[in-house]
Structure formats: structure tokens, C-alpha cells
Image (spheres, helix red, strand yellow):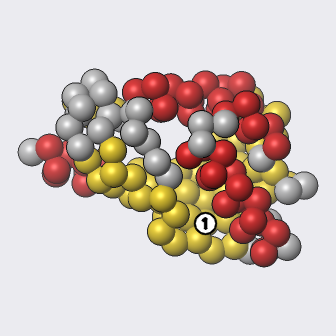
């Protein structure tokens, strides 16, 4: 299953990078847990759409990827220019580079659980 999950995850990231958010249902359950909060697919879609609106040059770059029977762990790298405030930080279009460490649990080949940690201190350090 690990190789299959890797293929699914890479296809999911490709959909994000290609702005194909209407395809999210292929990769994400209708009900999921995001950082221990119950979310719907519609809420997840809106969160990602909002990120893309505020960060027009957003690109998900997989730096590290590990898979298990029903889990994926990834270190994603971003080099982008968020507009206005991002994660409570006034970035205002300045270029920042940062990592997101994210863990996914899959059920039936789709994402059912997400745990995400973004290096906000690294962003603050770049803007100081």
C-alpha cells in the first residue's frame, strides 16, 4: 500500500500545484480531521482556495516523503510571496521560504486526517 499511497499523494500535490481544487474529492474524504478539528471537504477546499488567493505564486515542493500502510509524512518546501498577513504575520508581498511538516492518515485511498506544522518562526526571522 505504501507505493500506492505515494502515487496518490504525489497526484494530490500535483492537483494543488495545478490549481485543480475541484478534484480534491478524489483525494480527500467528505469528512476529515485537520489538526484535531472536524472539517468538511468544503471547509478544506475553502482553506486551500484562500491560500491560493493570498499567495498567487504558491507551489508545493515535496522535499521529503515517507509512507506507511495508511500514513504519509512529508516535508513540503515553499518559496513564495504571500500578500498581506499570512499565519498572523505581516508579510505584505515579501518573499519568504519555509517548511511545512505534515502527516496524513488515509482511509480507503483518501485523506482522512491531516496534522500540519508550519515553520512560522522561520518566516518571522526572515522578515526581521
Q: Residue at x 42, y 58 (%)?
A: 77
Q: Measuring from the top left, give residue 109's x and y in whole percent.
A: 85, 56
Q: Measuring from the top left, give residue 110's x and y in whole percent.
A: 81, 51
Disc 1 residue crowd, few under 14, some 14–19, many 20+, Cα 10 Å: many
Which picture quadrant has residue 39? top right
Q: Mark 1 sits on what residue?
A: 73
Q: Indicate left or right for 54 with 41 as reference.
A: left
Q: Indicate left or right for 17 with 20 as reference.
A: left
Q: Is residue 127 above or below residue 105?
A: above
Q: Quadrant of the N terminus?
A: bottom right
Report whether residue 43 is seen.
yes
Q: Measuring from the top left, give residue 115's x and y in whole percent.
A: 59, 51
Q: Measuring from the top left, give residue 120's x and y in whole percent.
A: 31, 47
Q: Is residue 22 above or below residue 34?
A: above
Q: Nearer the viewer, residue 63 or 127?
A: 63
Q: Residue at x 41, y 32 (%)?
A: 56
Q: Quadrant of the C terminus?
A: top left
Report whether residue 37 is seen.
no
User: Which residue reaches farthest left?
Assistant: 128
Q: Indicate left or right for 115 with 4 as reference.
A: left
User: Which residue reaches farthest right?
Assistant: 108
Q: Residue at x 52, y 63 (%)?
A: 62
- Disc 1 element: strand
Q: Residue at x 63, y 52 (%)?
A: 14
Amino acid at each position: 500500500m505504501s507505493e500506492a499511497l505515494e502515487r496518490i499523494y504525489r497526484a494530490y500535490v500535483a492537483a494543488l500545484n495545478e490549481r485543480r481544487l475541484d478534484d480534491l474529492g478524489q483525494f480527500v474524504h467528505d469528512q476529515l480531521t485537520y489538526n484535531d478539528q472536524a472539517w468538511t471537504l468544503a471547509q478544506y477546499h475553502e482553506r486551500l482556495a484562500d491560500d491560493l488567493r493570498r499567495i498567487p505564486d504558491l507551489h508545493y515542493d515535496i522535499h521529503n516523503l515517507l509512507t506507511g500502510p495508511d500514513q504519509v509524512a512529508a516535508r513540503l518546501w515553499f518559496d513564495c510571496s504571500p500578500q498581506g498577513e499570512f499565519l498572523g504575520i505581516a508579510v505584505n508581498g515579501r518573499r519568504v521560504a519555509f517548511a511545512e511538516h505534515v502527516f496524513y492518515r488515509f482511509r480507503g485511498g483518501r485523506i482522512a486526517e491531516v496534522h500540519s506544522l508550519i515553520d512560522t518562526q522561520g518566516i518571522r526571522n526572515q522578515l526581521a
